[in-house]
Image (tube, rainbow, N blue to C red):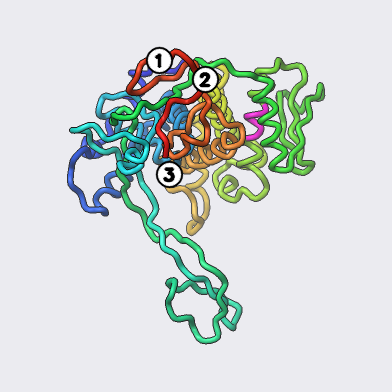
Amino acid sequence: MAPKPEDAWSAVTADVPAGTNMGGTRMTPEERIATLTEGLHKILEKAVESPSHWQVLLDASSTLWRYSGGNVALLVMQMAQRGTEEPTLVAGYKEWARHGRTVTKGEHALWVIAPRTARVQQVALPDGSRQRVPVGGQLPHGAVDDGKKTVITGWRGQAVFDVSQTQGTPLLVPRGGGSVVDSAELWRSLEGVARSHGFNVDVTDAQYGLTSGFTDFAEHRVQVGAWLGLEERTAVLAHELGHVLLHGPDDRLGRLYGSSADHRGLAEVEAESVAYTVLRAHGIDRGPQSATYLAGWADAVLGAEKDAMSQESGTKLPGSRADIAKSVLGRVTAASKGILEITLPPGFGGKITTVEADPRLDPTATYVGMGRPASTDGPVMAGP
């Protein structure tokens, strides 16, 4: 059973160093990244110790699904340390201003990790090799321009603020959790996800072992039990899509630590974590049904760590249980985003820049800066 929300949000940051609640602390860019990284590792170690803490991160990911798993964990950590509600809709100072809202006086920024990027020119050398040079720079002798590309050159801390830290133009903020889900519509959307990855979905009375669903990579087919009710069938399909997106023959990282196409080790936890996140984003709480899978989370991570240690030296493997948890969280949130971008649950996935893209109203929404409107004929939100 999941912990009470107020207990979960505070417990997930227990033992995280107080310095990670940076508030108005002045730091160099290097110090900020080091502090964020330390806090992230602490929170992931905590998640390994307790499946309920892992579930807290999945709950947050279902709201902030447009963010990376690591940044979701950082936002959870900082909001909980300040004793405030969980993050819902997050943006930078200038982005909030574009939408008619300003950061409330006295509020301190939340920090996420963002890439530093540079635009480079790729060139093909006469010997067949490729090289990157700064855009506008002199090309090596005999080189042929192979186009421009944006590359990550490092990492930086980026200041953002939750909608609860802002004021101004009234803004609709769907919070979900109580909306009525059309299971038939969600099923069709999930079928569309499968097709987009080249998989057919078969609802059949045939059974593979004792399972209710099975993913056949050789035949590009997902099998779901016909004896299941529509909601349960939808949940099984979401689980199998986790396998489709994560555990194919090309999943080299998964094979390194026991989460691979044979559906053992962390694979089942990963797939169920994807299903849990996707369904919760659509307003379906699968806590009790997911409990068996998620309860095995810690054992799966510890087993993966043991397997990694037994590998020959020199192999690139997650070096600790926190590294494994970070990798799994990143994989789960990336797969969930890939599904949710197609199924489009109510809400904005945590990013204010998507407000114009999805104007649907949710009857369980919270309205920031205004009373509940008398009519829901159209969205009440700031323009660009």
Spatial CA span between label 2 and label 1: 13 Å
Q: Do the residues labelled 3 and 2 touch (CB within 8 Å)?
A: no
Query: Between 230 and 164, which is closer to the camera in this rendering?
Result: 164
Image depth: mark 2 or mark 1 in front: 2
Label 2 neighbour load within 10 Å: few <14, some 14-19, many 20+: few
Q: Where is residue 372, by image quadrant?
A: top left
Along the viewing direction, whichever of 202 and 143 lies nearer the viewer: 143
Q: Quadrant of the C terminus?
A: top left
Report if residue 295 is visible in the image: no
Name the residue beneath numbered marker 1: 372
Count of marks, rendered view: 3
The residue carrying pointer 3 sits among few (fewer than 14), some (14 to 19) or many (20 or more) residues within 10 Å by Cα, namely some
Whether residue 103 sits left or right of residue 220 in the image: it is left
| Residue highlighted by disc 2 | 377
As helix, strand or loop, the secondary structure at mark 1 comes to loop
**Quadrant in which residue 226 is drawn:** top right
Residues in magenta, as a range: 237-241
Residue 76: percent from the left, percent from the top?
35, 31
